[in-house]
Image: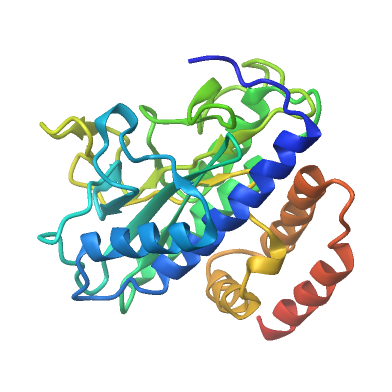
Amino acid sequence: MAMTKIKTPSEIQAMRESGRMLARVLAKVASQVSPGVNTQYLANIARAELKTLGGVPAFLGYHGFPDVLCVSVNDEVVHGIPSINCVIQEGDIVSLDFGVKYKGMITDSALSVIAGKAKPKDKKLLIATELSLQEGIARIKDGVRVGQISAAIEAVLDKHGYGIVRDFVGHGVGHQLHEEPNIPNYGSARSGPILKKGMTVAIEPMATLGRDSVFIEKDEQLIHLSRYIHLNPRASLLIKDLEDYQWSSYKEYLNQASGFCSKQEVMGFFKNTQAYKQFVLDQVDYGERLEQIKHQVLEEI
């Protein structure tokens, strides 16, 4: 696995375009997750939507993976293969993992959603894992050590008592789907290589309601937790664009967060998001819009 290289401005732009396609595909697929739907149906939606947008699926054929979308349900951590026989049930946690190739560059992202009525403990797991992602993203800058990202993620998940999957980690992305350095979701802030401006990485928090041990099914693709429910939201630094968000869903998300997180943590979410956008979109200022949204949400909670 090659070390992630510093990307040129044109390569960064291609990744932004690729990431916007990816974000739209995941949003479309996530909207279709509901009890009674099979996971092959979700993969077919992803394939059709990306074709319309003009991108190429990055996962299809990668190390023999047979489809365009990974769909992992409940204790499946990553690399779930879509199937008409895998039917989503009420309350299932469904992880949607997708990659896009565009103009020679690759983006990689995932999100997790809950089908139908969610259990409170599963909502809390989703919220805490999202917070850990934002804490990791907030550490990104020229000269940061990978360990600073890892330690920030670990601190959030440890605070809320969740297990951290250690066998699978974040990574560089761009010219290839997986590039060095690996970015664990745990570790010392003084450890790991130093990132430089123009490098692109995917941060991938993977949290559990129990232990961190996993096993690999005999198909060698599907990774399970040892009998524990999981949540696996993860994101490439270049795939989220504030203009693609439906902010009503974030208001709902933060209303749920208010019963689990302090206002300080909610404020931190926005600060982290703003720091992240400044890193990714450098010259574009979303600060004023973020402030408006922040005050709206805080009034409600």
Residue 242: x percent and y percent?
Answer: 70, 64
Residue 96 located left or right of residue 144: left
* Above-or-below relation of 65 to 36: above
Q: Is residue 224 left or right of residue 198?
A: left
Residue 274 visible in the shown view: yes
Say if 250 sits above or below 156 in the image: below
Q: Extreme bottom residue here?
A: 300
Residue shown at 50% from the left, 52% from the top: 129
Of 255 and 3, the residue lying toward us: 3
Is residue 59 depicted above or below 73 in this figure?
A: above
Tell whether 109 sits left or right of 221.
Answer: right
* Count of all numbered marks drawn on residues in the image: 0
User: Which residue lies at the image location 72% right of the left edge and 55% below the top edge?
Assistant: 273
Q: Quadrant of residue 83?
A: bottom left
Q: Is residue 15 left or right of residue 202?
A: right
Quarter of the figure with the C terminus: bottom right
Residue 252 x/y as whole percent: 56, 79
Q: Position of residue 235 (x, y in %)?
A: 54, 47
Q: Residue at x 33, y 40 (%)?
A: 60
Q: Nearer the viewer, residue 244 or 145?
A: 244
Residue 263 shows up from this direction: no
In the rendered image, which quarter is residue 189 located in? Answer: top right
| Image colouring | rainbow
Q: Position of residue 276 (x, y in %)?
A: 74, 48
Residue found at x 19% / y 70%: 89
